[in-house]
């Protein structure tokens, strides 16, 4: 079976068992503060397990894109080295939300593996949870008894808490699990060692392929276990491992999931796959990493220097480093794998082929940038002088942190010079960075405290900005030393931050409306609306009035609706290739990122502004459609955003059926006239192929125009009421240029005069010609020209100038090449002299400068200059 056939067989099997097929959630997580990336198939269903969302389908099945490169589940360093770990992988899953449990889950997993996929039964081993006395958890006797119906008891193995009690983190849904392992060894190997002894022993040919998790607990902050409202089944089967087993390969990388890319790499590098372990690892790393990189970018996360963007940049750089070091790819190559990958996932995850050009361009730009950085790092290493043939750990860490060098590359370059690396100091520096990063982002989250019966929380803010409600639950959180409370309401008019729109603020008033607390922010967590407050009401029970800050909400809606008009105008002016890549919408301004490969010209920006303002003046009424079947919406020509997870029913926002029609969960104006006016204030580049427009609307736009008018009037007054401002300003610029030339001419004459005067003040000391003098020139360039002129005129020159330009003291040091060769260093000298003026500086060995803030020290600088002459 091909990989595509294997995937489809899984989905079709569970569809025949009355499971609803759902699409993969984006790999980038947007509404769960505990996760950067989807790292397990259950992530998108966490709110269902916790009873915080309504269950639409009791049984579902899917294939979920997952990424494991950070946090508890981190496989990055094993990727490419072994045969079965990956950064991005597919997790095939079947789920039951309070419906079937262990009996059906076990029966169906066995049926699929042995009857559909035809895996020989004797190759399979199953495990069950043996219990844990410390946790007060008993042996999973039920799972054991169920397995005995299908499997010989010698192939049913007990597992400890580490292997057979699944938890996604320190807190959250969890439960005992039953794994299925397959022994892929040869008959000869099996005869020598019993496969049962190799289960969960990290044997590369005895591997876990499926895990049936029986979700029945919630792990609380204090470590205790709380029973979930209902029992659920959460299963996950590693697609890449399954394909390997069914295609009878010894490595995941030998299957048709990876081989097309690996063979392409081998062809382009001129190195045969299988010829050498180091080059094989490099090819596997590249083939694996491009999958993670491409899908994360397609889902809307661009490489950057922080958070999720930094993680994906690290993965990309790891792939480029392997290509550069082991496959001799000195020019960008990784991006060429994107079209192959997009074609491979066509019909499975079409978001990649839809954005193929964009993703490839982003990868190319990152490669170009990193190869430049890598080259700079190599130059730094070549200039480095090791002490006692040992590279300092701090320098090795700098190469890693700043230039992206893996420690093994630094060790390789060191060995070529006969050096070693202080790995202990390197590890200490690395640990310190990680500890500092964890401390900076640490959040201490308490358990939820229930106030009223835990019904579903409902958002009513599309229609109401003030309602009567109750508190369902609350918890305390602490971050960066500040304590806050998170509150969940039975009904809420507060919009939770999502889709680029900021969360609402407002008040929670007691029923008498005499006392209240401020709601400082509203966010989503796994679909749950969470309100932030610095304090709690004195009495948590009873009725409350939830009141949204209307002024802020209205201004935010102005900017949000304007982004929809802007998006449509961009497509109209620049082309249909334009797609939203991110946005920020608040009460003050809007920021809109979009795919486009060139700077938007001033003429195009003006045209875009005109279109948006025309639509505003037309006062187009909002057409809002809720609970529209997703496929009906798509067929109507609606714009859907990449990287968003849409359900079976969606909300459509339309401003003119022929202009702007988008899927959106945010809040909007009732008619475009409310926006008032629209003004673009900036256009810039964000990343390769991504541009950013910032704009203002409503009262902020009015204020902007008033300030511009005021500035215009002031400028006109300065130009004596000139009727032709452009001509008047041009005349001033011409006059200024003329005066600058005259000043430069005068300064040059002054430099020529000074150099002939100064030559006569040279002092010869120990064969060195010293010039130490205060120079009255008000131009740094003129002082530099004077110093270089004297260097050409005086042999063995050691020159020290002090200056004071616009009240700021400065020092210039110049040395002849002969003195530099003898060991004198202008940069070292100027740093030492700079202390006298409470400043610092540096430069090259023959020329350096310093600045400071204590002019009184300039006299001491000139007196101290002679002390640097060797005796």
Image (cartoon, grey):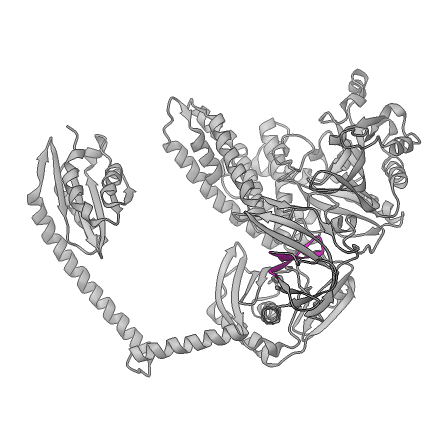
Q: Main secondary structure of the magenta part?
A: strand
In terms of depth relative to the viewer, which is nearer, 829 or 208?
Answer: 829
| Residue 247 visible to the viewer | no
Q: Is residue 21 above or below residue 411?
A: below
Residue 659 horizontal/vertical position (percent) = 65, 73
Quadrant containing the C terminus in the rendered view: top left
Residue 700 horizontal/vertical position (percent) = 51, 72
Residue 298 horizontal/vertical position (percent) = 63, 52
In terms of depth relative to the viewer, which is nearer, 456 or 678?
Answer: 456
Q: Is residue 443 above or below residue 271?
A: below
Q: Is residue 427 above or below residue 481?
A: above
Q: Is residue 710 above or below residue 780?
A: below
- Inspect the magenta stretch and tell me whether residue 236 lies in it: no
Q: Is residue 776 left or right of residue 126?
A: left
Residue 853 horizontal/vertical position (percent) = 25, 50
- Inspect the magenta stretch and tell me whether residue 523 lies in it: yes
Q: Toward which corner of the image does residue 568 lie, by quadrant?
A: bottom right
Q: Residue at x 51, y 37 (%)?
A: 433
| Residue 424 visible to the viewer | yes
Q: Is residue 335 left or right of residue 743?
A: right
Quadrant containing the N terminus in the rendered view: top right
Q: Residue furthest left?
A: 760
In terms of depth relative to the viewer, which is nearer, 417 or 554?
Answer: 554
Q: Residue furthest right?
A: 149
Q: Residue at x 47, y 75 (%)?
A: 703
Q: Toward which corner of the image does residue 790 lie, by quadrant?
A: top left
Q: Residue furthest top?
A: 192
Q: Residue at x 93, y 31 (%)?
A: 149
Q: Toward which corner of the image does residue 234 lie, by quadrant?
A: top right
Residue stretch in magenta: 518-534
């Amino acid at each position: 079976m091909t990989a595509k056939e294997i995937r489809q067989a899984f989905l079709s099997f569970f569809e025949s068992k009355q499971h609803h097929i759902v699409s993969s959630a984006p790999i980038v997580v947007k509404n769960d503060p505990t996760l950067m990336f989807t790292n397990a198939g259950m992530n998108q269903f966490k709110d269902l397990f916790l009873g915080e969302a309504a269950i639409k389908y009791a049984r579902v099945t899917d294939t979920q894109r997952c990424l494991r490169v950070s946090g508890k589940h981190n496989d990055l360093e094993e990727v490419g080295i072994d045969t079965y770990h990956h950064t991005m992988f597919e997790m095939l899953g079947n789920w039951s939300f309070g419906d079937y449990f262990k009996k059906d889950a076990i029966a169906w997993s066995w049926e699929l593996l042995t009857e559909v996929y035809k895996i020989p039964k004797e190759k399979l081993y199953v495990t069950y949870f043996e219990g844990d006395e410390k946790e007060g958890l008993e042996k999973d006797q039920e799972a054991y008894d169920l397995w005995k119906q299908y499997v010989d008891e010698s192939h049913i193995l007990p597992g400890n808490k580490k292997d057979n009690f699944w938890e996604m983190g320190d807190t959250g849904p969890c439960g005992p699990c039953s794994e299925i392992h397959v022994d892929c060894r040869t008959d000869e190997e099996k005869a020598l060692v019993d496969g049962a002894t190799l289960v969960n022993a990290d044997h590369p040919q005895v591997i876990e392929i499926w895990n049936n998790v029986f979700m029945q607990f919630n792990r609380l902050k204090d470590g205790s276990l709380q029973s979930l409202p209902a029992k659920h089944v959460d299963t996950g089967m590693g697609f890449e491992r399954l394909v390997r087993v069914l295609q009878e390969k010894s490595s995941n990388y030998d299957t048709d999931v990876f081989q097309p890319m690996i063979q392409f790499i081998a062809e382009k590098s001129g190195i045969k796959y299988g010829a050498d372990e180091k080059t094989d690892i490099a090819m596997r790393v590249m083939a694996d990493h491009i999958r993670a990189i491409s899908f994360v970018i397609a889902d809307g996360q661009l490489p950057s220097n922080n958070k999720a963007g930094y993680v994906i940049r690290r993965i990309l750089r790891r792939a480029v480093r392997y290509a550069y070091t082991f496959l001799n790819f000195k020019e960008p190559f990784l991006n060429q794998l994107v079209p192959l990958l997009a074609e491979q996932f066509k019909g499975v995850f079409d978001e990649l082929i839809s954005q193929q050009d964009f993703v490839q361009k982003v990868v190319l730009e990152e490669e170009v940038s990193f190869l430049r950085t890598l080259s700079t790092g190599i130059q730094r290493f070549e200039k480095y002088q090791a002490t006692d043939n040992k590279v300092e750990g701090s320098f090795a860490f700098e190469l890693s942190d700043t230039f992206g060098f893996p420690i093994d590359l630094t060790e390789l370059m060191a060995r070529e010079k006969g050096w070693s690396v202080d790995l202990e100091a390197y590890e200490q520096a690395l640990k310190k960075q990680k500890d500092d990063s964890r401390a900076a982002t640490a959040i201490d989250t308490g358990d939820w405290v229930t106030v009223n019966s835990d019904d579903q929380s409902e958002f009513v803010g599309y229609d109401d900005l003030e309602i009567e409600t109750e508190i369902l639950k609350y918890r305390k959180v602490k971050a960066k030393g500040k304590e806050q409370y998170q509150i969940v309401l039975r009904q809420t008019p507060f919009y939770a931050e999502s889709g680029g729109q900021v969360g609402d603020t407002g008040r929670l008033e007691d029923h008498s409306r005499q006392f209240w607390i401020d709601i400082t922010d509203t966010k989503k967590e796994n679909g749950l609306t969470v309100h932030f407050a610095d304090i709690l009401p004195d009495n948590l029970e009873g009725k409350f009035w939830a009141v949204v800050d209307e002024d802020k909400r209205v201004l935010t809606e102005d900017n949000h609706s304007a982004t929809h008009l802007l998006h449509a105008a961009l497509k109209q002016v620049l082309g249909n290739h334009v797609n939203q890549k991110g946005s920020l919408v608040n009460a003050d301004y809007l920021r809109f990122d979009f795919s486009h490969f060139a700077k938007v010209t001033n003429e195009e920006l003006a045209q875009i502004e005109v279109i948006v303002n025309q639509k505003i003046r037309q006062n187009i009424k909002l057409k809002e459609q809720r609970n529209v079947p997703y496929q009906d919406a798509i067929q109507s020509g609606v714009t859907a955003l990449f990287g968003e997870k849409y359900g079976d029913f969606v909300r459509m926002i339309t401003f003119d059926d022929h202009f702007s029609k988008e899927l959106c969960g945010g809040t909007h104006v009732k008619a475009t006239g409310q926006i008032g006016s629209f003004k673009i204030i900036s256009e810039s580049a964000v990343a390769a192929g991504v541009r950013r427009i910032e704009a203002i609307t409503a009262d902020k736009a009015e204020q902007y125009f008033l300030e511009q008018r005021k500035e215009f009037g002031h400028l006109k007054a300065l130009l004596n009421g000139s009727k032709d401002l452009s001509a008047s300003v041009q005349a001033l610029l011409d006059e200024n240029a003329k005066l600058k030339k005259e000043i430069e001419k005068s300064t040059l004459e002054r430099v020529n005069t000074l150099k002939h005067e100064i030559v006569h003040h040279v002092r010869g000391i120990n064969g060195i010609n010293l010039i130490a003098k205060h120079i009255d020139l008000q131009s740094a360039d003129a002082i530099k020209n004077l110093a270089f002129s004297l260097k050409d005129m005086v042999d063995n020159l050691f020159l020290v100038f002090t200056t004071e330009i616009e009240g700021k003291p400065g020092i210039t040091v110049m040395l002849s090449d002969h003195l530099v060769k003898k060991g004198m260093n202008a940069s070292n000298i100027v740093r030492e002299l700079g202390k006298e003026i409470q400043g610092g500086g540096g430069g090259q060995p023959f020329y350096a400068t310093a600045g400071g803030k204590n002019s009184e020290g300039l006299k001491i600088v000139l007196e101290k200059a002679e002390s640097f002459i060797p005796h």
